[in-house]
Image (cartoon, grey):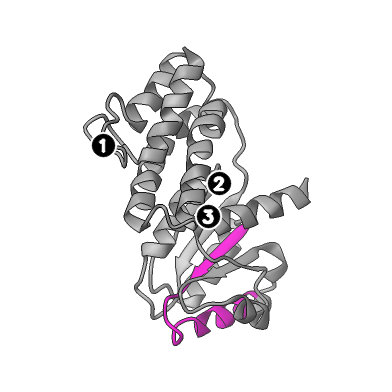
């Protein structure tokens, strides 16, 4: 029974079926979706960390592979990511009750002057589904507010997003402001967005450049491995 529920959860994550009323990529798939299966797993006393690792994360890894292979497109990936985000909301109180530690705390923001948020939202959802505690600070966020958040909340990671070549310059300003506040060595800074590159990330002194949300998960997991 346990293996059946987890296998079905994984497949429905891959198919992007949040509930039993949704159509998946394979339209012939019927039955409970991600939310119903997540609740069924809990009702059958399957541990929350097993649900995440073997069902949710395993499913999203395949979604990532298909997205990178251009077998899936952004709407397909978003459907899976949104289903995972909703499932994590169900699991959160169980994780807290079990004292299961998150992999790390991650604050994400679209920088000052930029109002684009699709990429940022995808990264946030994927990281949340991978076991990170994510705080979304929003769009068009002033540098001072970002520095204040880092000072008061001490996140492990800070993700900066920008779509435009004009707004990505704010990323360098944020890193310099963190240095001036004595906070730079307390948080790892990841940057991404359509205008950003690995070369630019190195130029401004960021810790990593992420091509997309799946890359962000890989980068953070690598950071976590070096800490242990």
Label 1 CA crowd tier, 10 Å (few <14, some 14–19, many 20+): few
Q: Residue at x 30, y 25 (%)?
A: 32
Answer yes or no: is residue 53 visible: yes
- Observer able to see residue 156: no
Name the mark on residue 116. none
Screen quadrant of the C terminus:
top right
In the depicted structure, whether residue 124 falls above or below residue 149: above
Start and end of the magenta stretch? 157-178
Q: Earlier in the sequence, mark 2 or mark 3?
A: 2
Of residues 60 and 200, the one nearer the viewer is: 60
Q: Which residue sits at x=62%, y=53%? A: 218
For residue 74, which quarter of the picture?
bottom left
Q: Position of residue 205 (x, y in %)?
A: 68, 77
Which is more N-terminal, label 1 or label 3? 1
Q: Who comes first in sequence, dot 2 or dot 1?
A: 1
The alpha-carbon separation of the residues under discs 2 and 1 comes to: 32 Å
User: For the residues marked 2 and 3, what is the alpha-carbon distance in whole angstroms?
Assistant: 13 Å
Labels 3 and 1 touching (C-beta < 8 A): no
Judging depth in this view, the residue of 221 and 68 nearest the camera is 68
Residue bearing the label numbered 2: 132
The mark tally for this picture is 3
Name above or below for residue 192 compared with residue 155: below
Percent of width and height locating residue 189: 62, 67
Which of the two discs, 2 and 3, sits closer to the camera?
Answer: 3
Q: Which residue in the protein does label 3 denote?
A: 214
Q: Which mark is residue 27?
A: 1
């Amino acid at each position: 029974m346990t293996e059946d529920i987890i296998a079905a959860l994984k497949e429905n994550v891959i198919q992007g079926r949040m509930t039993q009323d949704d159509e998946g990529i394979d339209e012939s798939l019927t039955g409970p979706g991600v939310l119903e299966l997540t609740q069924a797993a809990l009702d059958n006393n399957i541990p929350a960390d097993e649900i995440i690792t073997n069902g949710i994360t395993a499913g999203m890894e395949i979604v990532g592979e298909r997205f990178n292979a251009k077998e899936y497109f952004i709407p397909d990936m978003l459907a899976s990511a949104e289903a995972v985000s909703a499932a994590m909301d169900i699991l959160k109180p169980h994780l807290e009750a079990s004292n299961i530690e998150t992999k790390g705390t991650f604050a994400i923001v679209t920088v000052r002057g930029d109002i684009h948020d699709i990429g940022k939202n995808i990264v946030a959802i994927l990281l949340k589904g991978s076991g990170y505690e994510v705080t979304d600070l929003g769009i068009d966020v002033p540098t001072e507010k970002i520095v204040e958040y880092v000072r008061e909340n001490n996140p492990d990671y800070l993700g900066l997003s920008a779509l435009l070549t004009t707004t990505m310059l704010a990323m360098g300003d944020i890193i310099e402001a963190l240095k001036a506040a004595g906070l730079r060595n307390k948080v790892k800074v990841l940057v991404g967005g359509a205008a950003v590159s690995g070369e630019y990330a190195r130029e401004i002194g960021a810790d990593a450049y992420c091509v997309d949300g799946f890359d962000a998960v890989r980068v953070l997991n690598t950071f976590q491995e070096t800490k242990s």
